[in-house]
Image: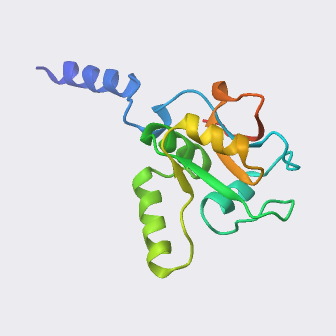
Amino acid sequence: MTAVRCIRLALLLLLLPLPWLPHAVHAEDMVVIVNAGSHVHSLTRDQVIDIFMGRFRQLPTGATALPIDVADPAERQTFYQQLVHKSLAEIGSYWARLVFSGQATPPFRAPDSRAALRLVATNPDAIGYCYRSAVTGRVKVVLALDH
């Protein structure tokens, strides 16, 4: 193969969408959700980071927040990439250090996104995330994340 063909091939590969890259996992935005009856109407990115990273587990209403993670790796990767720009490996490492030192416990992990939506819809202190298209009337969006 000539050098020109190699360069063209390399450039072509750089332009193709790569599904294993974090930003290409899912093109749809993630949203942070709470129970539809919650008195929380919006949260800042920093508040959501504090809750999901175990720094602060209180909602603005004063209630103890119950963060809900989704077990699906693709959905979790999309959420953490959009929220804190970190991979699941980095998130796992972060939580391993906190748990080992006894400083915090990770969010509860629901088996799938439907279970996470159900948990948020039935618990006034739960906070979770999902793709925007999965939002129902039983939950409300308090923060939209950009991809």
- Residue at the far left in the pictured view: 1
Instruction: Classify 142 as above or below 27.
Output: below
Quadrant holding the N terminus: top left
Query: Between residues 124 and 141, which one lies in front from this camera angle?
Result: 124
Determine the image quadrant of residue 10.
top left
Instruction: Classify 38 as above or below 27.
Output: below
Instruction: Classify 147 as above or below 64.
Output: above
Determine the image quadrant of residue 58.
bottom right
Res. 110 in view? yes
Quadrant holding the C terminus: top right
* Image-based side of 72 in relation to 143, left or right: left
Residue 53 location (% of width, % of height): 60, 62
* Image-based side of 122 in relation to 129, left or right: right
Query: Between residues 122 and 9, which one lies in front from this camera angle?
Result: 122
Residue 78 location (% of width, % of height): 52, 40
* Image-based side of 127 in relation to 39, left or right: left
Residue 143 location (% of width, % of height): 75, 42
- Residue at the far front in the pictured view: 122
Determine the image quadrant of residue 27.
top right
